[in-house]
Image: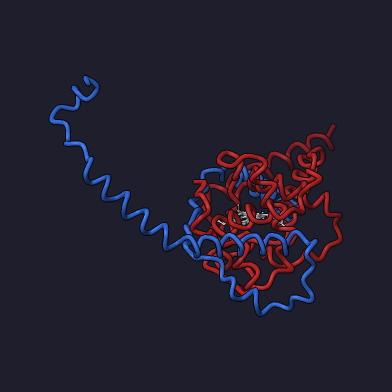
Amino acid sequence: MNKANLSLSLLCLSLSALLSLPAQAHDPKEHMKDGHKPNCAAMKDMDHSKMDMTDPLVQAMMRKCTQQMHAEHAAAGDIREEQGQRQKQEETEPQPQPEPEHKHKH
Amino acid sequence: MDKLKCLLATVFIALIAGLAFIYSGFYPMGADVPHNPLSYWALETLRERSIARAAAEIRVPADLNQAERLLAGGADYNDMCAGCHLQPGKQQSDFSLGLYPVPPNLTQAETDEEDATAEARIRFWIIKHGIKASGMPAWGPSHDDDRIWNMVAFLQRLPELSPEQYQILTARAESDTEQH
């Protein structure tokens, strides 16, 4: 094989490789649920004099941490509420239907 | 006439040689063997030209740099992209080490001077359509345009984030509604 042929075949090859590869798709590690809360304590260590409140980035961080604060304040109440709901649910839990076909009768 | 015959013969031989090479099994398919310079050039030029043409007409929203977009795009980036494209304070991952072509480290500012609008267009197109024969998936089938623009917005600010800022911006708070 001379040089020109070699390069040509390589070009052929790369083109055919391109055509034959769509099957390569794989599952990315997408939607990994990251349960971490924003670590807003770190905000306190940031240099506030350098923070520009008109900067959308700073606004975004502030918003996130205000939300987080609200969520934490409400947390105690939420737990009580949740427990109450669960109790109620248990009380009114419907009996399992013996025959699925009759489900819509009543 | 002789010249034409000679040319045709050369083309024919080249084709046969190319086919023979494909069938021979000598091509190194592994992602751990880099392309030779010629295939690299051909593939890179093919990619750059194709995307530049396809993205040329995309209209970039004027309001990319917005807190709302940064928050939405940040959480999505952390969930779906950081495994390959890294995050502040993280130099490598299994994906960044093993994929070929290597996923670019998007926490590093681009060195080539491209204007922000052109860059946003190209990024939007790549995220929406993906890149064939690379690890880069098309996110268009499962995410609407606005959500993709949010990620483009986040990418514009990503290189300036410290690990702490990144953590705050991208964390999905318990109060957030899960979109998936």
Q: Nearest the camera: A52 or B105?
A: A52
Image location of residue B147, percent across then percent down = 64, 45
Q: Position of residue A99 (x, y in %)?
A: 15, 27
Q: Colour of chain B?
A: red
Q: Colour of chain A?
A: blue
Residues B167 and A39: in front is A39
- For image coordinates 68% across by 52% down, the residue present is B68
Measured as percent of width and height from the top left, residue B133 is found at 60, 49
Q: Is residue B53 above or below residue A7?
A: above
Task: State the residue at coordinates (76%, 36%).
Answer: B8
Quadrant housing the C terminus of chain A: top left
Colour approach in the figure: by chain
* Residue displayed at 69% across by 77% down: A46
On screen, residue A101 versus residue A70, left or right, reads: left
In the figure, is residue B67 to the left or right of B2?
Answer: left
Q: Residue at x 65, y 69 (%)?
A: B165
**Depicted B152 relative to depicted B32: above or below:** above
- Which of the 4 image quarters holds residue B34? bottom right
Q: Is residue B4 visible?
A: yes
Q: Quadrant of residue A39?
A: bottom right
Q: Is residue B19 above or below residue A33?
A: above
Q: Nearer the viewer, residue B1 or B52?
A: B52
| Quadrant including the N terminus of chain A | bottom right
**Residue B36 versus residue B66 in the image, above or below:** below
